[in-house]
Amino acid sequence: MAKSAFDDFLQEEIKKQEGVAFPVKAGLLERLVVKKLPCTKMHPNPQDEFTFPDIGPNYEIVSNYEKQIMNNIRTHQDIFDEPIMVEKLHPHGYLILNGHHRWAAAMRLRVGKIPVKIINLAQESDIRKILENSKHDKRATFDMDEVVFRPEDAPYLEKKLGFPYSIKHKKRIRLGIPALFYSLSKNGYDIWLYSSTYESIDDVRDYFRCYGVHVDGIITGMAKDKKNTASRKAGVEKLIANKYAVTLHLDNDMILRTEKSTGQFQEFPLDPGENWSKDAVAVIGELEKNGKEKSNG
């Protein structure tokens, strides 16, 4: 498929999905393993700059992937090192979330099936439902990639999950995260996690259930280097922020507290090492104590 022909094909695919397709939740069995599905069942994402007529595919990248695919086929290796991330669509097929250039290369080479990982993202309707059901006016936010999840060789990690949970959940979290989440929930905070990577919200929520704690909101796929995800993040964040009078953002070395009504903020330092969670719980306890004294006085 030549460059111009593929460009036309992209726009035709986008038009076919307009007013017809929308994301639906995939079941556990669908999300459990990487699957090999036909390229033709994958649909380009109209919100990704890959499909924007004034930006479009980078054909140098596509060409490099074509060479990789042909080499992998020739040497009997998997077509891709990593699966393409997709979301299930109604009435049929899957929306590409990450991997457009690899998909384009496979399409142009007329590859039959490609490896995909099906995930569930939080939709606006999900977020609205969480906010409507919440009785709290305070929230705590975390960057999942930088603060909550940690590399396997990092110091100060929570104990690994036991069997059988360890089969599905292999990531590690910072020491004290479950205790901190418990403290926040006990003090009337909704917990919101953000990730720039594409993680299935069901898998993330289930992971923290294994540690006996609840997470209220999970926003994934917020890649920092894409215009469309930046605008999506701004819209989602505005929707969430309007709900809460107080926000605590917990980082590696500090807590930032902001009040919606006044716009005022306070910073509280944290020990980035072993006492990170202990310091955070102490700061939250002091804030709650001061808040009660203020309301009573």
Image (cartoon, helix red, strand yellow):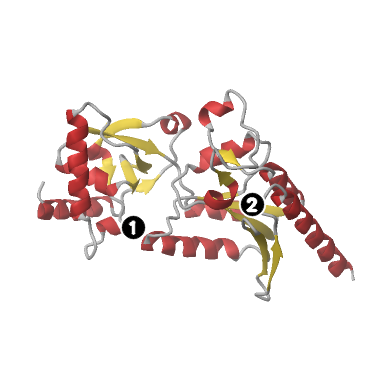
Q: Is residue 96 left or right of residue 9?
A: right
Q: Could you say where residue 82 lies in the image, as x and y percent from the top left? A: 34, 38
Q: Nearer the viewer, residue 191 or 19?
A: 191
Residue 236 visible in the picture: yes
Q: Residues within 10 Å of mark 2 (few under 14, many from 20)?
A: many
Above or below, 225 relative to 172: below
**Badge 2 amino acid:** Ile
Q: Which residue is mark 2?
A: 191
Residue 112 visible in the picture: no
Q: Which residue reaches farthest top?
A: 163
Above or below, 67 relative to 165: below
Q: Is residue 236 left or right of residue 16?
A: right
**Badge 1 amino acid:** Gln
Residue in the image at 76% along x and 49% along y: 186
Decide which of tag 1 and tag 2 comes sooner along the chain: 1
Q: Which label is found at residue 47?
A: 1
Q: Could you say where residue 199 lies in the image, as x and y percent from the top left? A: 47, 44
Q: Nearer the viewer, residue 189 or 198?
A: 198
Disc 1 secondary structure class: loop
Q: Residues within 10 Å of mark 1 (few under 14, many from 20)?
A: few
Quadrant into which the C terminus falls: bottom right
Q: Could you say where residue 55 lies in the image, as x and y percent from the top left? A: 24, 63
Give how far apart the Cα atoms at labels 1 and 2 are.
28 Å
Residue in the image at 80% along x and 56% along y: 285
Disc 2 secondary structure class: strand
Residue in the image at 56% along x and 45% along y: 149
Q: Could you say where residue 124 lies in the image, as x and y percent from the top left? A: 48, 55
Residue in the image at 70% along x and 51% along y: 276
Q: Which residue reaches farthest right?
A: 297
